Image: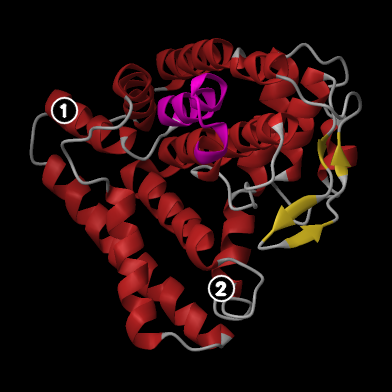
Amino acid sequence: MSNLSVALLAYIIDKLFGEFRFIKHPIICIGELITIFESRFYKDSIMRGLLLVMFVLLTVTASSLLISSFFGLFNTALNIILTSFVASMFLAHKMLFDSVKNTLTCKNKKEAIAMLVSRDTEHMNQSDIYKASIETYAENLSDGVIAPLFYLVLFGLPGIIIYKAINTMDSMVGYRNEKYENYGKVAAYLDDIVNFIPSRITALLIMLLGGVKNSFSFYKDGKKHDSPNAGHPITAMALFLHVKLGGPTSYFGKIKEKPYFGVGAVDIKADDLQKALSLKPKIDFTIIITLALLYFFIG
């Protein structure tokens, strides 16, 4: 069974259907696993955080291998269908797009953006909301689309599940605050490592599809981000839109002086967000055609 065929079908399934609400999402199960360990074994130490990572990865790896082995009992066609169905649940382009687009169309924009970001939203103006929406879309194109596909193609179903387990750990405990500074350090570093290549692929994809002339110019501002990865797709999106993203941002009641990413207007408008979202059909087409061609020639 080709990982490329699974990746292609999984992406199409996500594009057409998005989340399957009649099934408990596997990311929720991974989150519950993290919470169970933390509730029993949390300690403000790097070693205890390492044990969390080992526990989650061992559990998830064993589970994913068992699922793959079980699907392998069926004929090739059914194996591909079942594997693609499960893999599609770890992709999130349709859900990401719909959630971000909701900040354009809903009445309570602050409530909508609060569901997507960890920054303070109470005192956001329209420009702040649109900026946060664009940054969320750009950053999560890597975490929720390109990176999962990257590891699915390389390592099959276990690859995408293990990647999302690492990403989920980082999103839950990878914070630099009093509680998680030590406990979440290993999870955060591991997430930085696995996202290093996909984040740059995402930035390059945005630049190429957006028609930005110097395709690697995202690196200049992208490297200024606290994260070694998040700044690159955000900068690429800013350069495509001719705006400045980033800048002073409120987290937990305190202003964080983040650098600016990109060159252009600071006042972000609804048209800018709409333009960012307009990349989705191009991204879908590019990914589907690329996977299909790779499967045809090497699959």
Q: Earlier in the sequence, mark 2 or mark 1?
A: 1
Q: Residue 116 at what x, y percent from top left?
A: 52, 42
What's the residue type where badge 1 is placed? Thr
The answer, for residue 227, to whether it is visible in the render is no
How packed mark 1 is, by other alpha carbons closer than 10 Å (few <14, some 14-19, many 20 or more), is few
> In the image, what residue occupies the spot 19% across and 26% down?
81
Location of residue 219 in the rendering, given as x and y in whole percent from the top left corner? 84, 38
The type of residue carrying mark 2 is Gly
Q: Confirm whether the magenta stretch covers residue 114.
A: no
Q: Confirm whether residue 294 shows in the render.
A: yes
| Dominant secondary structure (helix, strand or loop) of the stretch shown in magenta | helix
* As drawn, 32 above or below 237: below
x 26%, y 53%: residue: 64
Examine the structure image and report whether residue 96 is included in the region drawn in magenta. yes
Classed neighbour count for the residue bearing mark 2: other residues with Cα under 10 Å, few (<14), some (14–19), many (≥20) = many
User: x, y percentage for residue 251?
Assistant: 69, 58
Q: How many marks?
A: 2
Q: Quadrant of the N terminus?
A: top left
Place residue 23 in its image quadrant. top left
The residue carrying mark 1 is 76
Position in image of residue 13 (x %, y %): 30, 22
Q: Secondary structure beneath disc 1?
A: helix
Residue 89's label in the rendered image is none
Residue at left offset 22%, top offset 28%? 80
Q: Which residues are magenta?
A: 93-111
The residue that appears at 55% across and 79% down in the rendered structure is 183
User: Which residue is denoted by mark 2 in the rendering?
Assistant: 184
Judge from the rendering whether residue 50 lies leftward or rightward of residue 28; answer left or right.
right
